[in-house]
Image (spheres, rainbow, N blue to C red):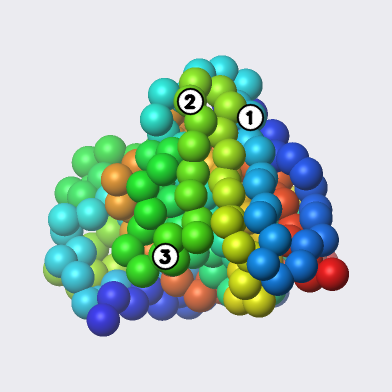
Amino acid sequence: ELQLVESGGDLIQPGGSLRLSCAASGFFFSDYWMGWVRQAPGKGLEWVANIKKDGSTRYYLDSVKGRFTVSRDNDKNFVYLQMNSLRAEDTAVYYCARHGNYNFESWGQGTLVTVSS
Amino acid sequence: DIQMTQSPSSLSASVGDRVTITCRASQSISRYLNWYLQKPGKAPKLLIYTISTLQSGVPSRFSGGGSGTDFTLTISSLQPEDFGTYYCQQSQSNPWTFGQGTKVEFK
């Protein structure tokens, strides 16, 4: 059974750093692009970043460029989101998602990041 | 960035009703239009991709249509399990963007 399980969400002060992890299982991980999508409290969905199957290509939302880094470990079946210089507006549930055919085919349950002093 | 606009923002309907949600893109997105359903406190679930292809396991009462910049999601006979918020999303170009959502509630 396909599973995506995020972890690492926490309450963090503005300017701080956090690394989110997403453990993938039930499918051949290195065959798929992976992405991160976030949802601020009471708001809609916002794509954040994605990474190619072999990690060679990465794309970012403009507002996180230079602060967030997406990476993956195809041996351990993990995808990560390193978040630096966090701002209040980064507060959200962060979902890990497996890409399908130009879509987000499968989603994890999400992990909450709260940026507040 | 391509802006996605859904209408209505919310609707109330009864079991058995036919429901249609509209999504408009700020520029042509070819066939790269997807629909998701999110229930409260849960992750979104892919319903339809590339305008009209049903994701595996999605009931046939759901259908998608449209082209270019204007798209629709139709539920032919609304069921109790269909409540939640529906989002359209384009994957024509980065950044992939979502509509603001349409909340479907029951009368």
Mark 2 falls on what kind of element?
strand
Q: Residue furthest bottom?
A: A1
- What amino acid is labelled 1 in the image? Arg
- In this view of the protein, can residue A39 be seen by the observer? no
Please provide percent x and percent y for residue A69: 43, 49
The foreground one among B104 and B101 is B104
Please provide percent x and percent y for residue A15: 68, 55
The chain identifier of the residue carrying mark 1 reads: B
- Residue B32, compared with residue A2, is above or below; it is above
Q: Quadrant of residue A78?
A: bottom left
Q: Are marks 3 and 2 on the same chain?
A: yes
Q: Which quarter of the rendering shows the C terminus of chain A?
A: bottom right
Please provide percent x and percent y for residue A74: 18, 63
The chain identifier of the residue carrying mark 3 reads: B
In the drawing, what numbered circle is on residue B24?
1
- What amino acid is labelled 2 in the image? Ser
- What amino acid is labelled 3 in the image? Val
Tag 3 residue: B58
| Spatial CA span between label 1 and label 2 | 10 Å
Crowdedness of circle 2 by 10 Å Cα count: few (<14), some, many (20+)? some
User: Which mark is first along the chain, 1 or 3?
Assistant: 1
User: Which mark is first along the chain, 2 or 1?
Assistant: 1
Please provide percent x and percent y for residue A50: 39, 47
Q: Are marks 3 and 1 on the same chain?
A: yes
The foreground one among A91 and B89 is B89
Tag 2 residue: B67
- Residue A87, compared with residue A12, is above or below; it is above
The foreground one among B98 and A114 is B98
Crowdedness of circle 3 by 10 Å Cα count: few (<14), some, many (20+)? some
Q: Are marks 1 and 2 in contact (CB under 8 Å)?
A: no
Q: Residue at x 49, y 44 (%)?
A: B64
